[in-house]
Image: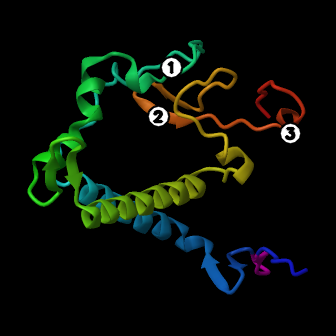
Amino acid sequence: MSETSHSTIDWNDDYTELTIGDGKIAIAKLKDLYSGLLKDATSKFNTLTAGISTPLPPSDVLSDDRAIDKPEYSFMDSGKPYMQGARFKGIQHFASTPGWIVRNDEVDGPVWSHLRMEKFMSDAEDLLALLMVLMHISNQPARSTELFTLQIRNSVNVHRSLFATWGDVSWILGYSKVNLFCNSQYLA
């Protein structure tokens, strides 16, 4: 049986550079790395939303009440007209843009271009990966056990982990090994 070992992180003697596996990162260059990744994420977002108006929502739209624990609740579908209009803006845009729909089937409706959808989904995955790396660089990295608990809406037994307050969106990640042994959720 063979085991794959994870890379170790080693600091140099004056703590100005670290080595991860075969790669070296100068601490002074982390700001440049973050700026470059942010630029890449912005570019990817602009590519994915080309032709779609994506203004920031008013701060009163991005409001949340953490006390609401009813199943399926999410601030994103709180019934506010702005959110209702924004949810399907992309689909409406692509449906009206030539090349996205190959044909309209009388029974099944529109048949989307496989190649365009595959490229869009690949770009969306790239954007999510960039956002995850940016989240890790700008904050304390989450463990994989915490990332598996991410939820945008409440479920029957577990509270959501995406919240909006004062116009900002944040994650509150919780994980506990107690969950393995009982049906209760605790913040660790």
Give left or right: position of 186 versus 90: right
Residue carrying label 2: 169
Counting from the top left corner in percent of width and height, residue 60 is at 34, 19
Q: Residues within 10 Å of mark 3 (few under 14, many from 20)?
A: few
Name the residue rendered at 61%, 50% in the picture. 139
Write down the quadrant of residue 106 in the picture.
top left
Q: Amino acid at mark 2?
A: Val
Give left or right: position of 61 versus 129: left
Name the chief secondary structure element in magenta: loop
Counting from the top left corner in percent of width and height, residue 110 is at 19, 47
Write down the quadrant of residue 181 in the picture.
top right
Circle nearer the viewer, 2 or 1:
1
Q: Earlier in the sequence, mark 2 or mark 1?
A: 1
Instruction: Tell me, yes or no, whether the highlighted magenta stretch contains residue 6.
Output: no
Per the rendered image, the range of residues in magenta is: 7-14
Counting from the top left corner in percent of width and height, residue 163 is at 52, 28
Q: CA distance from mark 1 to mark 3?
A: 25 Å
Q: Nearer the viewer, residue 17 or 21?
A: 21
Element assignment for label 3: helix
Residue carrying label 3: 177
Which label belongs to residue 73?
1
Compared with residue 112, is residue 85 higher up or lower down, i.e. above or below?
A: above
Q: Nearer the viewer, residue 62 or 126?
A: 126
Compared with residue 8, is residue 38 higher up or lower down, i.e. above or below?
A: above
Whether tag 2 and tag 3 are in contact, CB under 8 A, the answer is: no
Q: Amino acid at mark 1?
A: Tyr
Q: Earlier in the sequence, mark 2 or mark 3?
A: 2
Instruction: Tell me, yes or no, whether the highlighted magenta stretch contains residue 11.
Output: yes
Q: Amino acid at mark 3?
A: Lys
